[in-house]
Image (cartoon, helix red, strand yellow):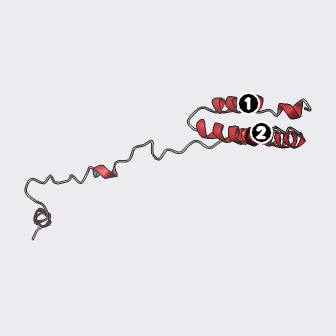
Amino acid sequence: MTPDADEDALTWAGDDKPEPDKPAPSAKVSHHEHEEAPPTSALVLIVYGILGGAYLIYTIGWVISIQRSTTVLPSLFANLMFRLGEGLAIGSPIIWFVAVFLLTRHRSLGSRLLWLLLGLAVVIPWSFVLGV
């Protein structure tokens, strides 16, 4: 028996024979699926570290300023909401830093750095800076 006869025995009438040159449709892979991001330069990593340190200092500033607070509100609900706001204020620098990295994954380096610098102005612990 010849090899062609063996292959013919495994097919039904009307089946198309797959061409050996072409891969099966499931084997097709998009070029975009396996592209790796270019490596981040050392200078950019140092800038990220400096900005991350600034955000960490802001978090510490919020903790210190909230520890100094002596605000007591008359109702339980108002007091709970005030404490929730304090907790969000403490977490705001970290939340901003992580959110910028997650939301600017597919954007340029300049865009990411701009958002990080904007965050330094937005989440600054003013009560600590002004000594209130």
Task: State the quadrant of the N terminus.
Answer: bottom left
Residue occupying image coordinates x 13% and y 67%? 6
The image quadrant that residue 55 belongs to is top right
The percent coordinates of residue 122 (x first, y second) are 74, 29
Farthest residue to the right: give it.
131
Q: Is residue 106 left or right of residue 56?
A: left
Q: Is residue 113 left or right of residue 28?
A: right
Residue 124 visible in the current orientation: yes
The percent coordinates of residue 87 (x first, y second) are 75, 43
| Residues packed near mark 2 inside 10 Å, few (<14), some (14 to 19) or many (20 plus) | few
Q: Find out whether the residues at labels 2 and 1 contact each other: C-beta distance under 8 Å.
A: no
The numbered mark at residue 75 is 2
Mark 2 or 1, nearer chain start: 2
The percent coordinates of residue 88 (x first, y second) are 73, 40
Residue type, numbered disc 2: Ser
Label 2 vs label 1: CA separation? Answer: 38 Å
Residue type, numbered disc 1: Leu
Residue occupying image coordinates x 72% and y 42%? 94
- Most foreground residue, 71 or 36: 71
Under circle 1, the secondary element is helix
Q: Is residue 101 left or right of residue 28?
A: right
Under circle 2, the secondary element is loop
Residue matched to label 1: 117
- Most foreground residue, 123 or 79: 79
Q: Is residue 12 left or right of residue 106?
A: left
Task: State the quadrant of the C terminus.
Answer: top right
The image quadrant that residue 77 belongs to is top right
